[in-house]
């Protein structure tokens, strides 16, 4: 039954909202239908969320007060950054209190000896790097969504990016986290010291997808920006040649800062969009970058070019200057934006396979998509075997969404059959819960659950995510029963 | 199910069988870090982890190795194909190194041990074989069991086998030393030193990479002090202090005795032991929940406490 509240701003959950307002102030709590509707979903294809009241805390104390208030009302909480997650991690299930960290966006102290900067979780990834640039540093994890995604989201999803090949993913760049635990206690996990004693709770928290508590302050490692960079663009007549080049470079003992591959369809889309000078007639282009000191980058760039030619590159181009280099990267990083020209909807997948299997699994993605009458484009972090098949569709076409999900499932299975894993950087969220049993036994999942329950014994932090049905905090049927007085 | 169940490997199955599900048990490695975290409780049965290198895939930058394998054997095998890993080679076993969780002296070059453990296969308190993480260099598939096993001293699970990330060996590596250099300035002058050490008087640096880069960095160091190439690092005093890198500016020789500090890292090798620090109460409570969830009866390595070091 639909029920609407006419009084502006009142909405459902009157008592809860009153307590939240008392705890953190009227201007930090929203409960109107527009706000709740807006936060029902994230950048994934899943949209079955139901948001409760939305809070915008300004401090750790605010977050703590929100968590405690929600707890008193028996409600779960879901932390939220920019909502760019692609696995549905931030989707509110069962009308939890949504904790948006976007107003906690200050860059705090920097420690030059430790090469660490403390930030609040709502700081945008690229803003941090821009802040550090004049000082000769940057934050190494650079997801393609870095213009909007937050450090809190990066930590929760253990996000990656093109330059994580040499520099490592988010977990390697976070050394301490202040967390409001699901019971409302505040704990500092990890620390600036060399080897903090005790269990590595910091390491466990990173990648916890908001189910282990809410990060309120983050000590992020800052990376000195290398003085010399060489960026190569190589074109290939077959996707396989590009994939083989990637394997051959690693086998030759070179770990470039980044190695990204784009297939012809995505290259054409990007070229139409940003005019980066990509060759649109090649079956695949490989963007390889090395950074470091002047002599070494030349040695590596020449070796990579040589390997590319041996593997059949039809063109090898070295970016002449920073402008050309930036243009090549802009193209790569706007790839997903560019495909909006081609189809109204897309589903971006994320699996990892051993590098040696890249070419085979790619071939399978084309075959799978064709069999289901879909268009697939491939743009991916080839250096670490991280595939990102993009399925394009128009959701208005009857039955197409179902086909997209079936094709996606087949791509996941093909990756696992090749010895890969379910996700390289987007996480499990609600997207891949059901696939977890393909990779792990019940005993394995039971142990993952033990870790989760150590942080959140009562399933109050972002329930219904990561672990598949049958494990505690996974079954949200009872939670999705909409609370009394709630509109839908 | 794509990967075969762990129990299908007779070596892992036999180790799980040996660990069993009832009595107090701990893994005995090479005993190089036997005293860390306190003494093992009397009457605890000691078992050995399986040994051997299962496979090294240099082009995938991974190695799968049994936990009882000596780190030295692993290092030699990786070197044959021009690679290395983050495990310190000081006479211990792979499992012991991971359970102790200490980083190598060259941590700024070879990376942290914590980040290098991609997949862990261990025997649980219930005697079951558990797999966490994945065999690829990049993986965010569920809760991160490998992270919680590193440095846990075998109190949450007994490690049978791991998959580690490997990296190419640098083309060149050299040590240089100066007696007149500010170690902090030396660190700031270099792009990616693998180590900067300081004993209060001498500063040592380890430079690695392509030969011309190493030469250029050494020349650059001339602005900081008169550095000359030396054979290797100084002998390291036995005790490890874990400090924040900024604290190295205010070291007290009377507290430490002789010391060798790792600049930019915060680790100090000293003659006297670091006073043990209590975990803050919320962290201690959370750690206790982790322990009781993984090992409800407290049978894994009783007596040892990773928080007390
Ligand atoms: C176009 C596009 C390109 C992308 N490219 C990449 C890429 O290259 N690499 C990559 O890894 N990802 C990529 N992503 C995915 C996404 O941007 C990342 O996962 C990002 O880190 C999410 O950050 P966010 O602030 O948007 O988090 P949200 O989507 O708001 O939340 C993500 C998860 O984090 C939790 N969370 C948020 N803040 C906190 C906090 N403070 N404490 C605890 N939990 C919290 C949420 O509950 C949720 O589970 C891309 C997405 C898009 C749309
Ligand atoms: C710079 C540096 C210098 C070092 N120098 C020295 C040195 O001079 N002398 C020295 O003794 N060490 C030294 N070490 C440390 C040592 O090399 C490692 O920590 C070592 O590999 C430990 O292995 P082990 O087999 O000896 O462990 P052990 O001492 O046998 O065990 C350590 C702990 O781990 C547990 N454990 C062992 N194996 C497992 C397993 N498979 N599963 C679960 N738990 C397990 C044990 O029960 C015990 O609690 C140094 C380390 C560094 C970084």
Image (cartoon, rainbow, N blue to C red):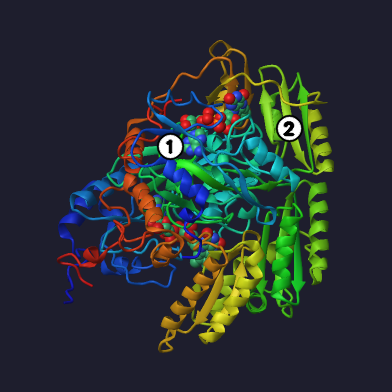
Q: Secondary structure at mark 1?
A: loop
Residue A282, placed above or below residue B160: below
Task: Give the number of the mark in front: 1 or 2.
Answer: 1
x%, y% of residue B133?
A: 49, 52
Please give the chain letter of the residue carrying mark 1: A
x%, y% of residue A91?
A: 36, 64
Residue A52, placed above or below residue A229: below
Task: Please name the residue shown 56% across and 29% down the image.
Answer: B30
Q: Secondary structure at mark 2?
A: strand
Spatial CA distance of label 1 from label 2 is 30 Å
The numbered mark at residue A182 is: none
Task: Please name the residue shown 50% across and 71% down the image.
Answer: A413
**B139 horizontally vs A2: left or right:** right
x%, y% of residue A78?
A: 33, 56
Task: Please name the residue shown 55% across and 23% down the image.
Answer: B240
Task: Report crowding for label 1: few under 14, some 14 to 19, many 20 or more residues within 10 A (C-alpha).
Answer: many
- Residue bearing mark 1: A199
Residue lying farthest to the top in this orientation: B254
**A157 horizontally vs A94: left or right:** right
Q: Are marks 1 and 2 on the same chain?
A: no
Residue A488: tell me if it is visible. Answer: yes
Task: Please name the residue shown 58% across and 18% down the image.
Answer: B270
- Residue bearing mark 2: B206
Occupied quadrant, residue B196 = top right
x%, y% of residue A150?
A: 47, 55
Residue B120: tell me if it is visible. Answer: no
**B11 horizontally vs A484: left or right:** right
Residue nearest the viewer, comparing A386 with B293: B293
Residue nearest the viewer, comparing B156 with A299: B156
Marks 1,2: beta carbons within 8 A: no
């Amino acid at each position: 039954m639909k029920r609407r509240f006419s009084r502006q701003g009142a909405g459902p959950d009157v008592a809860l909202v009153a307590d939240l307002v008392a705890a953190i102030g009227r201007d930090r709590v929203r409960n109107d239908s527009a706000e709740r509707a807006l936060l029902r979903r994230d950048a994934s294809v899943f949209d079955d969320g139901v948001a409760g009241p939305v809070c915008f805390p300004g401090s750790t104390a605010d977050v703590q007060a929100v968590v405690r208030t929600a707890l008193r009302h028996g409600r779960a909480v879901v932390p939220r950054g920019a909502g760019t997650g692609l696995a549905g991690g931030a989707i509110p299930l069962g009308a939890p209190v949504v904790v948006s960290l976007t107003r906690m966006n200050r860059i705090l102290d920097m420690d030059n000896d430790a090469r660490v900067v403390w930030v609040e979780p709502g700081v945008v990834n690229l803003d941090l790097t821009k802040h550090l640039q004049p000082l000769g540093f940057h934050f190494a994890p650079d997801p393609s969504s870095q213009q909007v995604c937050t450090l809190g989201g990066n930590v929760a999803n253990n996000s990656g990016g093109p330059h994580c090949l040499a520099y490592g993913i988010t977990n390697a760049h976070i050394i301490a986290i202040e967390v409001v635990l699901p019971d409302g206690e505040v704990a500092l996990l990890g620390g600036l010291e060399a080897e903090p004693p005790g269990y590595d709770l910091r390491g466990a928290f990173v990648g916890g997808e908001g189910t282990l508590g809410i990060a309120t302050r983050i000590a992020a490692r800052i990376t000195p920006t290398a003085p010399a960079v060489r960026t190569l663009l190589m074109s290939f007549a077959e996707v396989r040649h590009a994939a083989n080049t990637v394997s051959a470079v690693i086998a030759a003992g070179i770990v470039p800062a980044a190695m990204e591959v784009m297939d012809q369809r995505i290259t054409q889309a990007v070229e139409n969009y940003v005019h980066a000078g990509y060759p649109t007639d090649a079956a695949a282009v490989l963007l390889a970058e090395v950074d470091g000191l002047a002599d070494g980058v030349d040695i590596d760039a020449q070796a990579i070019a040589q390997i590319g030619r041996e593997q059949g590159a039809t063109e090898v181009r070295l970016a002449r200057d920073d402008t050309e280099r930036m243009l090549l990267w802009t193209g790569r990083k706007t790839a997903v934006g560019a495909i909006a020209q081609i189809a109204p909807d897309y589903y971006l997948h994320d699996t990892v396979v051993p590098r040696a299997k890249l070419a085979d699994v790619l071939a399978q993605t084309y075959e799978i998509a064709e069999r289901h009458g879909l268009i697939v484009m491939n743009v991916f972090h080839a250096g670490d075997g991280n595939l990102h098949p993009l399925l394009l569709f128009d959701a208005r076409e009857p039955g197409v969404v179902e086909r997209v999900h079936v094709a996606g499932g087949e791509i996941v299975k093909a990756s696992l059959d090749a010895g890969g894993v379910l996700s390289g950087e987007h996480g499990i969220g609600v997207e891949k819960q059901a696939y977890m049993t393909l990779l792990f036994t019940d005993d394995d999942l039971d142990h993952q659950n033990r870790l989760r329950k150590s942080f959140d014994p009562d399933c109050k932090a972002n329930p219904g995510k990561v672990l598949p049905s049958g494990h505690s905090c996974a079954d949200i049927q009872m939670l999705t029963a909409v609370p009394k007085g709630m509109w839908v | 199910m794509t990967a075969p169940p762990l129990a299908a490997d007779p070596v892992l199955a036999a180790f799980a069988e040996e660990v069993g599900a009832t009595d107090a048990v701990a893994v005995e490695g090479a005993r190089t870090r036997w005293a860390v975290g306190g003494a093992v409780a009397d009457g605890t049965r000691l078992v050995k982890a399986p040994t051997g290198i299962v496979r090294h895939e240099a082009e995938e930058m991974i190695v799968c190795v049994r936990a009882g394998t000596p780190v030295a054997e692993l290092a030699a095998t990786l070197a044959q194909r021009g690679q290395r890993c983050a495990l310190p080679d000081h006479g211990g076993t792979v499992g012991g190194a991971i359970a102790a969780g200490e980083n190598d002296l060259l941590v700024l070059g070879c990376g942290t041990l914590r980040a290098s453990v991609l997949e862990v296969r261990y025997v649980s308190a219930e005697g079951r074989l558990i797999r966490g993480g994945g065999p690829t260099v990049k993986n965010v598939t569920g809760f991160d069991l490998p992270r919680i096993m590193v440095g846990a001293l075998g109190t949450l699970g007994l490690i049978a086998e791991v998959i580690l990330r490997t990296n190419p060996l640098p083309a060149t590596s050299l040590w240089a030393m100066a007696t007149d250099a500010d170690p902090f300035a030396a660190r700031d002058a270099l792009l990616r030193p693998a180590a900067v050490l300081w004993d209060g008087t001498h500063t040592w640096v380890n430079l690695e990479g392509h030969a011309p880069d190493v030469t250029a960095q050494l020349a650059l160091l001339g602005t900081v002090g008169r550095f000359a190439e030396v054979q290797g690092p100084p002998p390291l005093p036995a005790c490890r202090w874990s400090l924040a890198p900024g604290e190295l500016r205010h070291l007290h020789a009377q507290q430490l005795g002789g010391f060798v500090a790792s600049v930019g890292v915060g680790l100090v090798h000293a003659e006297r032991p670091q006073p043990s620090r209590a975990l803050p109460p919320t962290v201690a409570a959370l750690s206790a929940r982790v322990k009781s969830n993984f090992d409800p009866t407290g049978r894994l390595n009783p007596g040892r406490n990773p928080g007390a070091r």
